[in-house]
Amino acid sequence: MGATLIDECYASLECRVADTRPVNKYNFFVLEVLKAWVDPSVKDPRTIHHRGGRALMVAGETAEVPSAMR
């Protein structure tokens, strides 16, 4: 049985804990993604990002820049 998807989420990752050694020193888990899901009908998702402490930000406008590749 896989992880339950949340209807309001644009994308979901099903993971397993791969390494707990960094937990005590860095409070950090290493995860392995087992399955990924994304809603292809959402073209411009408004995503929330944690910036540390109690700070969050909501992603804004998309900016396109010309490629430097020839």
Image (tube, rainbow, N blue to C red):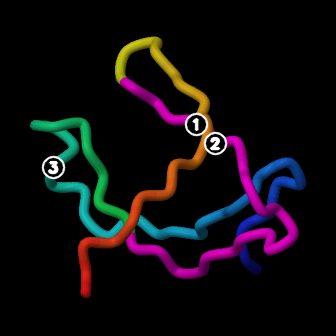
Badge 2 local density, few (<14 within 10 Å), some, or many (20+)? few
Marks 2 and 1, Cα distance to the nearest angstrom? 5 Å
Which residue is under mark 1? 59
Q: From mark 2 to mark 3, how far is it between C-alphas? A: 27 Å
Q: Are marks 2 and 1 in contact (CB under 8 Å)?
A: yes
Look at the numbered disc 1 and give the secondary structure of its residue. loop
Tags 2 and 3 in contact by the CB under 8 Å rule?
no
Q: Residue at x 82, y 62 (%)?
A: 42
Q: Along the horizontal axis of the image, is 31 left or right of 46?
A: left
Disc 2 marks which amino acid?
A: Thr
Q: Nearer the viewer, residue 2 or 5?
A: 5
Task: Classify mark 1: residues with Cα within 10 Å, few (<14), some (14-19) or many (20+).
Answer: few
Q: Residue at x 53, y 25 (%)?
A: 57
The mark found on residue 22 in the picture is 3
Point out the residue furthest to the left here: 25
Quarter of the image where one finds residue 51 = top left
User: Which three-letter amino acid code belongs to the residue tagged 3?
Assistant: Pro
Indicate whether 40 appears above or below 64.
Answer: below
The amino acid marked with disc number 1 is Ala
